[in-house]
Image (tube, helix red, strand yellow):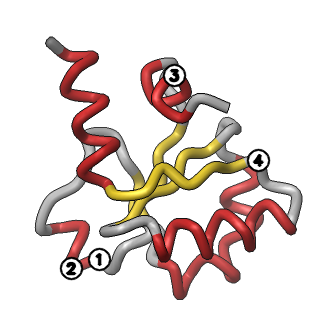
Amino acid sequence: MNIEKMILDGASVVDVRSVGEFMGGNAPGSVNIPLNEVPDKVEEFKKMPQPLVLCCASGNRSGQAAAFLNSRGVECFNAGSWLDVNYVLAQKAS
């Protein structure tokens, strides 16, 4: 699946960085659910419009979250860095 197209089509973006990292900068419209909270919030993820696009600082944590959530029946994809997601959204806005 083309992650850039999903972002441009309005997919739900979830940032799995810590609250502090998220507050330091984030992609517009993204939701912050830190990686350590993901296992406890599977039902919350299932209620979000899918597919989900996950991001973090480098793609490592979002990759872990995507693997975990996919194994629990949540359709999601690792978009890598939140800066990449932000770049795609900025292109859409211009």
- Dot 3 or dot 4: first in sequence order is 3
- Dot 2 or dot 3: first in sequence order is 3
Q: CA distance from mark 4 to mark 1?
A: 24 Å
Q: CA distance from mark 3 to mark 4?
A: 15 Å
* Label 1 residue SS: helix
Q: What amino acid type is highlighted by mark number 1?
A: Val
- Asked whether the beta carbons under mark 4 and mark 1 sit within 8 Å of each other, the answer is no
Q: CA distance from mark 2 to mark 3?
A: 29 Å
Mark 4, residue position: 75
- Asked whether the beta carbons under mark 2 and mark 1 sit within 8 Å of each other, the answer is yes
Instruction: Single out the mark in the foreground, 2 or 4.
Output: 4
In the rendered view, tell whether residue 13 sits above or below residue 64: above
Instruction: Single out the mark in the foreground, 2 or 3.
Output: 3
Q: Callout 2: few (<14), some (14-19), or many (20+) C-alpha neighbours within 10 Å? A: few
Instruction: Single out the mark in the foreground, 4 or 1.
Output: 4
Mark 1, residue position: 19
* Label 4 residue SS: loop
Q: What amino acid type is highlighted by mark number 4?
A: Glu
Q: What amino acid type is highlighted by mark number 3?
A: Lys
- Asked whether the beta carbons under mark 1 and mark 3 sit within 8 Å of each other, the answer is no
Residue 21 lies in quadrant = bottom left
- Dot 4 or dot 1: first in sequence order is 1
Mark 2, residue position: 20
Quadrant that contains the C terminus: top left
* Label 3 residue SS: helix
- Dot 1 or dot 3: first in sequence order is 3
For residue 5, the mark is 3
